[in-house]
Amino acid sequence: MYAVKSTLPDEDLRVVAGALQGALVDLVDLSLVAKQTHWNIVGPRFRSIHLQLDEVVDTARQYSDTVAERASALGVPPDGRVGTVAATTGISTVAEGWQRDTDAVGAMVDSLSGIVGRMRDRMKAAGKADPVTEDIFISLTGELEKHHWMFQAENGS
Amino acid sequence: MYAVKSTLPDEDLRVVAGALQGALVDLVDLSLVAKQTHWNIVGPRFRSIHLQLDEVVDTARQYSDTVAERASALGVPPDGRVGTVAATTGISTVAEGWQRDTDAVGAMVDSLSGIVGRMRDRMKAAGKADPVTEDIFISLTGELEKHHWMFQAENGS
Amino acid sequence: MYAVKSTLPDEDLRVVAGALQGALVDLVDLSLVAKQTHWNIVGPRFRSIHLQLDEVVDTARQYSDTVAERASALGVPPDGRVGTVAATTGISTVAEGWQRDTDAVGAMVDSLSGIVGRMRDRMKAAGKADPVTEDIFISLTGELEKHHWMFQAENGS
Amino acid sequence: MYAVKSTLPDEDLRVVAGALQGALVDLVDLSLVAKQTHWNIVGPRFRSIHLQLDEVVDTARQYSDTVAERASALGVPPDGRVGTVAATTGISTVAEGWQRDTDAVGAMVDSLSGIVGRMRDRMKAAGKADPVTEDIFISLTGELEKHHWMFQAENGS
Amino acid sequence: MYAVKSTLPDEDLRVVAGALQGALVDLVDLSLVAKQTHWNIVGPRFRSIHLQLDEVVDTARQYSDTVAERASALGVPPDGRVGTVAATTGISTVAEGWQRDTDAVGAMVDSLSGIVGRMRDRMKAAGKADPVTEDIFISLTGELEKHHWMFQAENGS
Amino acid sequence: MYAVKSTLPDEDLRVVAGALQGALVDLVDLSLVAKQTHWNIVGPRFRSIHLQLDEVVDTARQYSDTVAERASALGVPPDGRVGTVAATTGISTVAEGWQRDTDAVGAMVDSLSGIVGRMRDRMKAAGKADPVTEDIFISLTGELEKHHWMFQAENGS
Amino acid sequence: MYAVKSTLPDEDLRVVAGALQGALVDLVDLSLVAKQTHWNIVGPRFRSIHLQLDEVVDTARQYSDTVAERASALGVPPDGRVGTVAATTGISTVAEGWQRDTDAVGAMVDSLSGIVGRMRDRMKAAGKADPVTEDIFISLTGELEKHHWMFQAENGS
Amino acid sequence: MYAVKSTLPDEDLRVVAGALQGALVDLVDLSLVAKQTHWNIVGPRFRSIHLQLDEVVDTARQYSDTVAERASALGVPPDGRVGTVAATTGISTVAEGWQRDTDAVGAMVDSLSGIVGRMRDRMKAAGKADPVTEDIFISLTGELEKHHWMFQAENGS
Amino acid sequence: MYAVKSTLPDEDLRVVAGALQGALVDLVDLSLVAKQTHWNIVGPRFRSIHLQLDEVVDTARQYSDTVAERASALGVPPDGRVGTVAATTGISTVAEGWQRDTDAVGAMVDSLSGIVGRMRDRMKAAGKADPVTEDIFISLTGELEKHHWMFQAENGS
Amino acid sequence: MYAVKSTLPDEDLRVVAGALQGALVDLVDLSLVAKQTHWNIVGPRFRSIHLQLDEVVDTARQYSDTVAERASALGVPPDGRVGTVAATTGISTVAEGWQRDTDAVGAMVDSLSGIVGRMRDRMKAAGKADPVTEDIFISLTGELEKHHWMFQAENGS
Amino acid sequence: MYAVKSTLPDEDLRVVAGALQGALVDLVDLSLVAKQTHWNIVGPRFRSIHLQLDEVVDTARQYSDTVAERASALGVPPDGRVGTVAATTGISTVAEGWQRDTDAVGAMVDSLSGIVGRMRDRMKAAGKADPVTEDIFISLTGELEKHHWMFQAENGS
Amino acid sequence: MYAVKSTLPDEDLRVVAGALQGALVDLVDLSLVAKQTHWNIVGPRFRSIHLQLDEVVDTARQYSDTVAERASALGVPPDGRVGTVAATTGISTVAEGWQRDTDAVGAMVDSLSGIVGRMRDRMKAAGKADPVTEDIFISLTGELEKHHWMFQAENGS
C-alpha cells in the first residue's frame, strides 16, 4: 500500500515520529484548553485575557498543522483524533464552568510550563536525528516560552 | 458566585443550553476529524480534497466559537474540553493512518449527514425557546448542508 | 444515477424546490435587466443611476448563486439556462434602445415591486418546509426592498 | 405627495413601524451613552473598557442605520432627531463627569439589560407581521446579548 | 478624587473647556441631523445627496471624538449625553418625515453655515489660550467649510 | 431624440455594431452556461472544475460589460435582454440536470470552440472598420482560447 | 551627447514623434481643463459631475505619462512644459469662473470630441510606423470615447 | 447668479484669494516641471532622481487640489487653466530636451527655493486674514522645504 | 563645505534649531524608556499597559523622524546619537529590572508630564520664528497630552 | 494521443509557433541574466541598479508565462527547459563574477537591444498569421523598450 | 579589485561556497522544470497539478534568491547563468512535449527526491562551517520535503 | 518578589543572559546610528543610501524587540536604557554633523562588521546553552551580514 519513502534511516525516523506525535497531541489539546478558558473566564481582566488566549489558540493551531504535516512529509501518518488526544495528552484537565481570571492565568502558566518542558525534550531528541524537525521545535518552543512569560507577568506583582 | 442573569425563562434555557452544548461537541470534533483527514488523505484527488477539508475546518472552528459564546451570553458555561468531546461526540471515529481519497470523501459525507440531522433537531428545539439561537443553527445548518452536497458531488458519477 | 439524499421529506422538498427555481429565474433575469438599463440609460441622472444599477446587479448575481447552490444542496438540480429564464421569467421585457433616466427608474420600481411580491410568497411557502431556505429568502427580500425604496425615492418628489 | 407603497397590510405595518422607531431611539442613545463613557472612564481597567465601549458604539451605529433604512424601505420615515431621542429613550441618564471603571461597567450592564428586554418584545411583535424586520431584531439581539455577557463577565468574580 | 492635572492656567482652561464643550454638542447634533436627512431624503438627487450626507456624518463623528478626547486630555470631562445635546444645540430642528432633496440641501447649508460661524468664534477664543485646541478647530473649520461649499454648489445655478 | 454622434462612418459603424451585438449575446449566454454547469456538475473532479468554471464566468461577465459599453460609446444601444439572448445565441443548449464532470468538460470545449470561431470572424470584420473594437476582440479571443486549451487539457490523456 | 538609439528608421520616427508630442499636449491640457471644471462646477448635478471629472483627470494623467515615456523610449525628448502646452493645445479655453453643470458637461463633450478626432488621426499615422505606439493610441482612444459617451448620455434626454 | 457667501470680511477675502490663486499657479506649474524632468533626465542618478521627482509631483498635485478647493470653499472661483498658469507662473522655464542629472537637481533646487519664498509670503499674508488658509500654507511649506533639502543634499558634497 | 541655505534669518534659525534639537533628544529617550517598560512590566495590567506603551513608542519614533528631518530641512544637522541623548535628556532614568504595573504607569505620567512642559516652551519659542516648526510641535504636544491623559486615567480612581 | 485542435491553419501555426518558442527562450534567459547581475553588481549605483534589475526579472517572468501559455493555447507544447534555453538563446553570456555597475548597465543595454530587435521581427511575422499573438508581442516590446531606455539613460551623460 | 571580506575562515568558506553554488543550480533548474511541466501537463488532474506546480516555482525562485544572496554576503559571487545551470544541474531532463498528469507527478517526485538528498548533504557540510547557511538549508529542505510528500500523496493509492 | 521561573539551568542562563543583553545594546545603538546617518547624509547617493539606512533601522528595531523579549521570557529583565546603551555599546561614535555619502557607507560597513563579529561569538556561546536563543542569533546574523554585503558592494569598484 501507499508509503512515503522517508529520507531518514529507520531508527532516526522512529525517534522523530514519536516526538512529532507527542507534540501534535499537546498542541491540539492546548488549542482546546485555551478556547475553553477564552469562553469561561470571569473577572476584572476578562477582556484582556480573553483576547490573549486567542493568541495562544493561534499558535497552537498553526503549529499543530506544521507538526502534523511534518510527520506526513516523513512518511508517518499523524494522529490528531479526539480519542487519541484525550487518552494521551499531558495537560491537566481544566476545571468545569466559569473560571476566575487569576485562576485562569495560573492554569495557563502551569499548562504552558509542562508543554515547554516536554518540547525541550523533543527538541533534544529530534536534534540528533533530523535538524528540520528540530528547527520546528525550536521556533515552537520560543513561541510557547513567550506566552509562558506573558501569563507569568500577568500574575506577577 | 458569578452568574449571568439569563433573559430566558428556566425551562427554555435548559432546552437551549442542551442544544448549544451538543452542537459545540459536534463542531469541535468535526474540526478535528477534518484536519485528521486533511493530513492523511492519499490518491489522485489529494490536493483538491486536502484544500476542501480546510474549508470544513474553517466552518467548524468559526461556528464552535459562535455557539460557545452564545451559551456564555445566556449564562451557561460551555464545555469544549477534549475529554467531554471524546466522551459525548456523535461522530464515528476516523480510521487510523493513511486514507484513500474516495474513502475520505465517503467518510465526510457520513459525518456531515449525521451532524446535519442532529442540527435540524436542535434547530427545531431551540426555535420554540430562543429565536436568536435558532438563527445560529439555521445559518450553520445551511453551511453544513452545502459541504454535504459538495462531498456527495465529488463521489457522485 | 447520482442523487443527493435530501434531508427533507418529499412533499416539503417539492415545495422548496419550486420556490428556489422560481427565485433563480427572477434573479438571473433581474441581473440582465439591470445591466441592460445600466448600458442604455440617458439623462441628467445618467451617472448616478448607472452606478446604482450595478449594485442591483451585485445583489442579483450573489443571490442567484446562493439560491442555485441551495437547490443543489437539497439534491435538486437548478435550471438557470437562458431558454428557461426567457420562458418562465415574471419580469416584463425592458423596452429596446436608449432609456430616459426617469423611465428607467420607474421600470426598476415596477420590476422590483413584482419580484418582492413573489419572494414574499416563496418566503411563506418555504417557511413551513425548510427554515434554512426561508432564511435565504428573508435576507434576499430585505435587500430587494431596500433597492425598491431607493428607486422610489429617486422618482419621488 | 411622496409615499413608498408598502408591501405590508396597514395593521402589520403599524406594529412594525412602532418597533423600528423604538429600536432606532434605543440604538442612537446607546451609541451616545457608550461614547460618553468611553471619554469619561477612569481606573485600572481604563484602556481595556475604553476599547470595549467603542465596539458597542460600532454595533449601535451600524444597527441604527439598518433599522432606520428598514423603516424607509417599508415607507415609514424614521425619526432619529436628538429631541425625539432625548424625549423617548428608555435608557437611564449616565452620571455627569468622570466615571470609575467598575461603575461604568455596571451601568453598561444595566443599559444593555434594558435594551435587550425591549428588543425581545419588538422581536416578538415584528415576527407576526414581517419576518424581514424580525430577522434584523434577531441578529441585533444576539449582538447586544454578547456585549451584555462581556460586561457582566468583566464585573464578575 | 481623580483629576487630570491640566497644563493650562485656570482662566485659559475655563475658556478652552467652554469652546470644546460647545463644539462637541454641535458635532454630535450634526451627526444626527445628517443621518436623519440621509434616511428621509426624496427626489431626483436622492442617491447623490444620500451618499454626500454620510461624508458629513464621517466628519462629525471623527471630530466629536477628537474634541471630546481633547477635553479629557486637559482634565475636563466632556458631556455628549443626549439630554445635554438636545438642550444646548445651536442647530435648528429638522422637519419631520420625508424631505425633498432641494429642501434637504438648503437645510444643510443653513446648519453648516451656523456651525462654521460658531467654530470661528471658538477658534479665536481658544487661540489665545491653547494652540493645540486652536489647531483642532482650524482643521475642523476647514472641513466644515468644504462641506458648506459643496452643498451650496449643489443648490447653485 | 438622444443620439451619440459616432466617430465612425455609417458603413463601418454598421459592421462594428453587428459584431459587438453578436459578441454580447455569446458572452451573456456563456456566463449563464458556465454557471449552470458550475451548479450541476458531479464526479471526481467536481471541486476542480466547479472552480474553473467560475473563472470562465468572470471572463464572460467582464467582457460582456466591455463589449456592451463599447457599443454605447459608438452610439449604438446594446441589447443583452434575456429574450434576445435566448433567440439569437450561437451556443447549444446545455442538457438539463446533473452533469458528469467529463461530459461537462467536453461541453465547455465545444461551446468555447464555437465562440472562438465566431470571435475570430468578428475580429477580422471589425479590424477593417475600427481598431479600438478590434483590440477588444483580440484580448477577448486570447482569454477564450486560454480557457479552451485548459478544458481540452483536462480531458486530454 | 546623450542619445537613445532608436529601433525605428528615421522617417518612421519623425512621424511617430510628432504624433506622441501632439498627444502629450492634448492630455496635459485635458487634465487641467477637467480639474478646472471639477473646482468650478455649480448646479444640481454638482457632486455627480465633480466626481466624474476626476475620472477624466485620472485617464489624462496616466496616459500623459505613458505617452511621454514612449517618446523617451524611442529616443525623442517629450515636451510637456506649460508654455508649450499653452501655445500648441487644440482644446478651446474654458470660460472663467463658476460653470453651470449643463454647460460644463457640454464643454467636456466638445473637448473630448475634438481630442478623439485628433487621436484617431494619430492612431492611423502611427500604425504605419510603429505598432507599439499605435497600440497605446488605440487603448487611449477607447478610454476617451467611453468618457465621451458618458458625458453625452448625461446631457441626453 | 451663484455665489458662495464667504465667512470672511471683504478685505480679508481679497488678500486670501490672491494668495490662494498665486499658490495654485505655482503648484500646477511645479507638477508640470517635475514631470518634464522626470521624463528627460539622463545620467548615473537617472533612476533615483526619476523616482524622487514623482514624489514632488504627488505633493504638487495633492496641494493644488487642496488650494483650489479652499478658494471654492471661500466663494472664489480658482483659475488653473493652462493659459493662466503659463502667463503668471513664477517658475523659470525648464530647458528643452534631455537634462543631465546634476543640472536637473540644480534646477529643482532653484524652483523649490523660489516657491518656498513666495509661499512664506503667502503664509504671512493669509495668517492675518484666515487661519484655515494659513494652516494649509504651513503644511505645504513644510513639504516643499523637505523636498528642497533633499535635492540640495543630492547635489551636496 | 555643504550647507543648506536656510529660509530663516540667523537669529530665528538659532532659536528654532535649539528647540528642534531639544525635542529630538526627548523623543529618542521617550522611545527607549517606553520600550524598556514594555519589556519589564509586571502585574495584573501587564498586557493592557504592554500594548499601550507600544503606542507611545510609535508616537516617539514617528515624531523623532519628523523633528530631525525638519532640522535638516532648515540646514541644521540633527544630533540623535546615543551619547548626546544620554548626556542631555530631560527624562529621569527608569529603575532597573522588573517594574510593577502601577509604578510603571506612574513613571510614564511623570515622564510625559515633563516632556509636555518642555514642548510647550518650545512651541512658544518656535512660534515667533517659524510657523512650520511650531505646527509640528503643536501636533506633537496634542499627541503627548493624549497619552498623558490615558496613563493618568489608568491610575485614577 | 492528446492534441489541442488549433484555430489557425497549419502554415500560420508553424510561423507563430516558431516566434513564440524564440520569444520564450529569450525571456527565460533574460530573467536569468538579470538575476545574475542583480546578485553580482558592485559600485556606487549598487542599490539603484540592483532594484531596477528585479523589475526586468518581473517583466521577463511574467511574459515568459504569457508566451508559453499562448503556445499551449494554440496546441504547440512550449519548451523552456534549461538545455534548450542554453543551446538556443540569442543573449551573450554574462561575464563571471562581480560586475562593475557601469559595465552591468552597458551589458543590459546590449542584451535588451538584441531582444527588442528579435521581438520586432517576431511581431511582424506573427501579425500576418495571428493578431492575438501579435498583440502579446506588441505589449512585450513596449515593456522591453522602456527598460532599454532606462538603462541607456542611466549610462547617458 | 572588489572583495567582500568574509567573516569565515578560508577552509570553511570553501565548503560553504560549494554547497551554496550547488543549491543555486538545483533551485534554478527546479524552477524551470516545474514551469515546463506547468505548461505541458495534460489529463484529468490538469488544473490541480498545474496550480500545485506554481507553488513549487514559488519555493524555487524565493530560495534561489536567498541562496545566491547568501553567497554574495559571504563574498563569493554566485553563478546562476543558463550555461552553468545546464552544465552542472543534478536534475534529469524532462521529456519534450505534452506530459500525462500521472507521469508529470512521478517525475516531480523523482526530481524532488534527488534534490532533497543533495540538500541534506549540503546541510550537513554547511553545519560544521556556518550555522547561518545551515539554517537556510534546513528551512529549504523542510519546504522541499513538504512538496515531495504532496506529490507522492497525489500518486499514492 | 516577582520572578519568571527559567527553563534553563543557572549556569546556562547566565551565559545566555549575557549574550542577549550584549545583543540588545548593539541593536539599540545600531538603530540610532543608522537614523543619525539617515538624517545627515549628503552627496550624489543621498536618496539611495537614505532609504537603505531605514532598512537597517527596521532590522535593528525588530530584533531589539525580539532579543529583549527573549530575555524576559527566560526570566531575565533586559536593559535597553539610554545610559546603559551609551556606556556599554561596542559601536564607535558617528562623527557629528553632515556626512559625505562615501564616508557614511564606509562607517556603516565598519559598524556592521564589528556587530557581526560579536554576534557570531554570542551565537556560539548561546548554542551550547539554549538552541532557541541561538536560532534568534542565527537569523539576526544572516540579516546583518546581508546589510554588510550591500554596503560593501556600494563602495566597491
Image (cartoon, coloured by chain):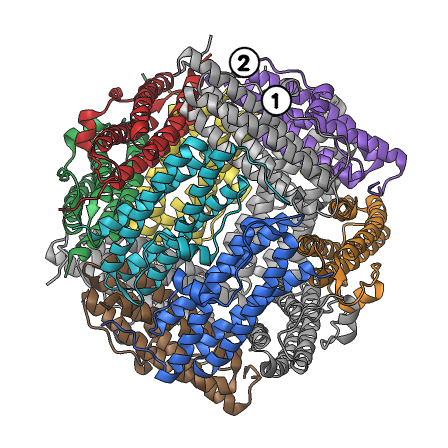
Chain colours: A green, B red, D cyan, E blue, F purple, G orange, I brown, K yellow
Q: The disc labelled 1 sits on which kind of residue?
A: Val
Q: Residue I116, percent across and down?
A: 36, 78
On the image, numbered disc 1 is attached to which residue? Answer: F33
Q: Chain of mark 1?
A: F
Quadrant (top left, top right, bottom left, bottom right) of the N terminus of chain E: bottom left
**CA separation, marks 2 and 1?**
13 Å
**Relative height, residue E108 to residue D15 (above, below):** below
Tell me the quarter of the image containing the C terminus of chain E: bottom right
Q: Residue at x 75, y 66 (%)?
A: G1
Q: Is residue B63 visible?
A: yes
Amino acid type, callout 2: Gly
> Residue under circle 2?
F97
**First along the sequence among labels 2 and 1:** 1
Q: Is residue I135 above or below residue A102?
A: below
Where is residue F42 drawn, in percent x and y?
A: 49, 16
The residue shown at (36%, 49%) is K16
**Which of these two is toward me, D131 or A130?**
D131
Q: Quadrant of residue D134?
A: top left
